[in-house]
Every structure is written in C-alpha cells, then in structure tokens.
Amino acid sequence: MTITILDGGMGQELIHRSGSKPTPLWSTQIMIDSPHLVRDIHADYFAAGADIATTNTYAIHRDRLAGTAFEDRFEDLHRTALDMALAARDAHGSGQVAGAIGPLGASYRSDLQPPHDIAVARMAEVVTLIAPDCDMLLFETVISAAQTRAALEATRGVGKPLWIAFSVDDEDGSRLRSGEALSDAVALCGDADVLLANCSAPEAMPAAIDILKASGKPVGAYANAFTQITKDFLKDKSTVESLSARRDMGPETYADHAATWKNHGATILGGCCETGPAHIAELARRCARD
C-alpha cells in the first residue's frame, strides 16, 4: 500500500521556534515578523519525508485580519505564504503544495460561520488567490455541513483537486464538532477528491476513517496532540495559550496511532497541531519499512 505523507503542524511549530507570545493572528503574526521561519519549517518537513507542504494560509481570512494593523495585507500575506512553501519545495527538488483554507470566524466554532452566500464569496476569494500555485486545495478543520457546502461551492470549476479535512469530536469520531453526523457531511462530498480527518484527538480517528472510506474516495488522517479543546479556546479572539500539549504524544506514540489509522484504510497520514518534523520523520520511517 502506497502511503502519502503530509507535513505536520505549522502554527505551534512557529510559536515554539520564534519564542513569540501567541496572538489571535496565530501563525499569520509570526509569518509577518519572520517569514523565513515558515520556509524553514516547510523545508524540515520535506527533509523528514513529507510529500506535501501545506501553505501557511489557514488563518488568513479578512474577518480574522479585521481590526488589526494588517487588514490591507490580505493578498500580500497569501503571496508570502505561497512563496515560502514553493521555495522549500523547489529547494527540496520534489513534492507538492496544498493550499490550506481554514474556517471563517474561528476554528471549532460552527456558530461563527457566516450566511452561505457570504461564506462562499469569502472562501472563493482565497481560492482564486492560491489555486494557481497549488497542486490541490485543502479545506481544513471543517466542522459542519454548512462549512462543507460552502467549500464545495467555492471551488466549483476551479480545476484543482479538492481535499476536505473534517475535525471530529474528540470522544466520538463519528460526529463533527458541530454535533452533526460526519456521515451527513460526507454525503455532500461527491465533488471532493480526498476526504480526511484532522485536528482531533488521535483516538477519535479510527471511527472517522471508517465513515470517510465509505465514500469510496482516498482517505487519511492527521491528528492534533492537544490534551483537549478547552472552553477558553472557544471564546472570541482566543489564542493557543488556552490549550496544552499532551505529554504522551511523542513521535513513536503518534506513529503507533497512525498505524491503527492505516489499518482502518487511511492512505494519507500526517500531523496537525503540536506535531513537528520528528513526528513526520517517524511516520515516514515506518511507512518506508512497511
């Protein structure tokens, strides 16, 4: 079985390397201050064995930039993120680039999704900016049927493969974080090319993969290594200071979980928040051995 290796987390890795205090702009703020760190992290993931670099565009939305000093840098920030991923790929000599698009409003907050037409327009604006330089478009941390519909409509006719990554309940991988059944969102995804589970507890992934693979599409998973998604993190303008890393999720333990996902049918494996190049290196090593 051929396994595609995704990269690992970007935002937390940037915070760790920069020594900066987390802000609501998260990885975007650090990219503004130190863009070379984004390139270096992409390069380290490629060196670790990743096949795909995920652009640092997850949190670059107009609603997240609103009220900051960077409201007028929407296009410029996307360009910087793309350039850093492309530079790392070119230096490595191989690999692909996935254009990341995160949720509008905030992660894990289905209540902040704007009305459908507005959501589609905002997502489509990002798609138009990044699609020409990407091998695929990756909607990450999708937690509701409404977000799924908007992503599908925003990419209609773009001509790039569409990957959708759902974030599921940490204790019940059959449900989205909105409480809706994952199967209901999957049923909407006829036009998607790949379905994934992301930014959820490693233990929730097997149940999610079982539902995703019923679609007949390639499936995969990349979990986070947070202890839990706290109530403080779900507040407006939160930062990752509200979250803590698990102490039991080093590279070997994480790869053990990924082996289970593989046994459930995942052919695309990677890492999300609080995973780094060492986690991806262990994943790549085991997949090459298998």
Image (cartoon, grey):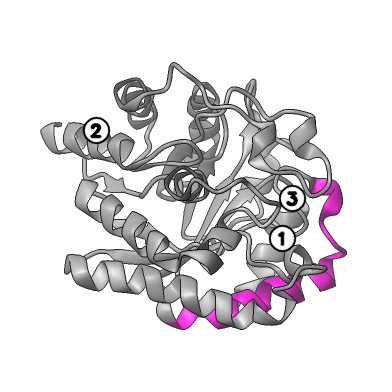
Magenta stretch holds residue 174:
no
Question: Residue at horizontal 57%, vertical 33%?
Answer: 200
Q: Are marks 3 and 1 in contact (CB under 8 Å)?
A: yes
Identify whether 82 is placed above or below 14.
below
Identify whether 93 is placed above or below 44.
below
In terms of secondary structure, where does tag 1 sit? helix
Q: Are marks 1 and 2 in contact (CB under 8 Å)?
A: no
Question: Residue at horizontal 44%, vertical 74%?
Answer: 82
Q: Quadrant of the C terminus?
A: top left
> Which mark is first along the chain, 2 or 1?
1
Q: Which residue is mark 2?
A: 282
Q: Which residue is mark 1?
A: 149
In the drawing, does residue 151 fall left or right of residue 68? Answer: left
Mark 3: which amino acid? Ala
In terms of secondary structure, where does tag 2 sit? helix
Q: CA distance from mark 2 to mark 3?
A: 34 Å
Q: Are marks 2 and 3 in contact (CB under 8 Å)?
A: no
Circle number at residue 145: 3
Please name whichever residue, 207 or 22, is drawn nearer the observer in this view of the structure: 22
Identify whether 199 is placed above or below 80.
above
Res 121 seen here: yes
Question: Residue at horizontal 61%, vertical 46%?
Answer: 21
Please name whichever residue, 107 or 131, is drawn nearer the observer in this view of the structure: 107
Measured from the top left, where is residue 271 in percent x and y? 42, 40
Give the main secondary structure, helix, strand or loop, of the magenta stretch: helix
